[in-house]
Image (spheres, helix red, strand yellow):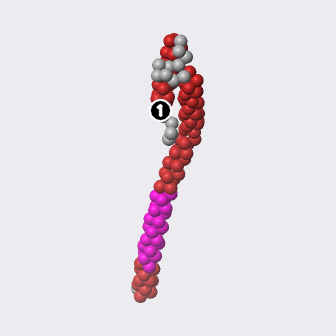
Amino acid sequence: MQGLPADGAVANEEKNLAGQFGDGEAAGTGHGGDGRGQGELERELAGLAAHEERASNVVERMQLDLPRALSLREKRTARHESARELGTTRTRMVDTEAAAANARQERDRRLGVVESLNHEIAALEYDG
């Protein structure tokens, strides 16, 4: 996501702030070694914790959406496969229709030959 640092970066920053906060308390100064006050460190730590919570929510939403995304990808793949099979079937239908038309023409030609032969036979029987 844009604007969200890596989870590791947030965790490292929290450790740094916690270390600074702890160093200040150990020294009894109430603030970190860089001169920042305890309140400022607490606000920064709270801000990082809130940011980490938002990042965690984003990750959780993505994890919840993953099965749906996978299902949609499977459906899209199946739809493309069906479209490809439909195209193949249509091509086969055209080829079959062409073969059927050729077979009808061949049948008609042979029927014409048979009729011609039957006429010749009838003529020979009449003459003969």
Bounds of the magenta segment = 86-112
Q: Is residue 114 among the parts visible in the rendering? A: no
Q: Nearer the viewer, residue 87 or 62?
A: 62
* Quadrant position of the C terminus in the picture: bottom left
Residue at 46% from the left image edge and 61% from the top image edge:
92
Quadrant of the rendered image containing residue 66 = top right
- Amino acid type, residue under disc 1 in the picture: Ala
Q: Residue 9 location, x and y as percent?
A: 46, 29
Asked whether 95 falls inside the magenta stretch, the response is yes
In percent of width and height, residue 90 lies at 49, 62
Question: Along the line of sight, which residue is nearer the eye, 116 or 20?
Answer: 20
Q: Mark 1 sits on what residue? A: 6
Residue in the picture at 54% in, 22% down: 37
Query: Which residue does the image show at 50% across and 39% down from the upper left?
Result: 3
Q: From this viewpoint, which residue is outermost toward the bottom?
A: 127
Residue depicted at 54% across the width and 42% down the height: 69
